[in-house]
Amino acid sequence: MKVAEQHLPLLQQAQTGDPAALAEILRLCQPDIRRYAKRHCLVSDIDDAVQEALLILSRHIGSLRALAALSGWLFRVVERECRRLGRKALRFDPYDEEKLDHWLGSHSREGLRMELASALESLPADYRQIILLRDFEELTVRELAERLGISQAAAKSRLHRARTMAREYLLG
């Protein structure tokens, strides 16, 4: 996050109620919040999540105790907001722990293996391959990219899509 040690006086001014300092802190944080939201939100929810995170920061900046805690706290706020907006838009929470626990409890160990094998077989070859390389051969993202002849960003993206598709197959 761009709010670094050099901005500690600015953060302290914002905490004491200086509106110009608060505006500058919000300006400095916005690009990082947006980047993080792009990874965790539906495309249609990015702007709303960023706006809500900045609003929450402006309301609670006075209670922030340490500069080091700012980025972690903000990222949790954005992630929580993305999940809230996603649940609202889709009426679905992909991280529904209760649903996952129920699903796991309703299958035997052998049944889980069979379901997982079916889920992997249902994936397109590129997605199946990247899951097998990452989760079974335990390659790093860099090694995945090299083996597949793609960028690291493309490898991460493909792995994320593959896992999402497998999760939807298993839980959907």
Image (spheres, grey):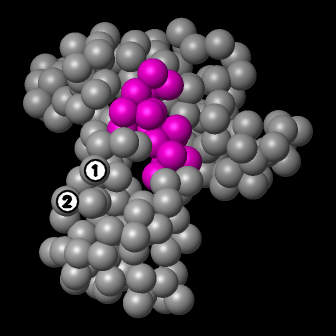
Q: Which residues are magenta?
A: 33-49
Q: Nearer the viewer, residue 122 or 156?
A: 156
Place residue 121 in its image quadrant: top right
Q: Nearer the viewer, residue 69 or 52?
A: 52
Q: Looking at the figure, which quarter contains the C terminus? A: top left
Where residue 126 appears, x then y in whole percent? Answer: 71, 22
- Label 2 crowd bin: few (<14), some (14–19), many (20+), radius 10 Å: few
Q: CA distance from mark 1 to mark 2?
A: 6 Å
Instruction: Name the kind of residue labelled 1 in the image.
Output: Leu
Q: Nearer the viewer, residue 7 or 36?
A: 7
Can residue 48 be found in the magenta stretch? yes
Res. 59 mark = 2
Residue 111 in sight from this viewpoint: no
Where residue 130 appears, x then y in whole percent? Answer: 66, 33
Where residue 51 appears, x then y in whole percent? Answer: 36, 42
* Residue matched to label 1: 55
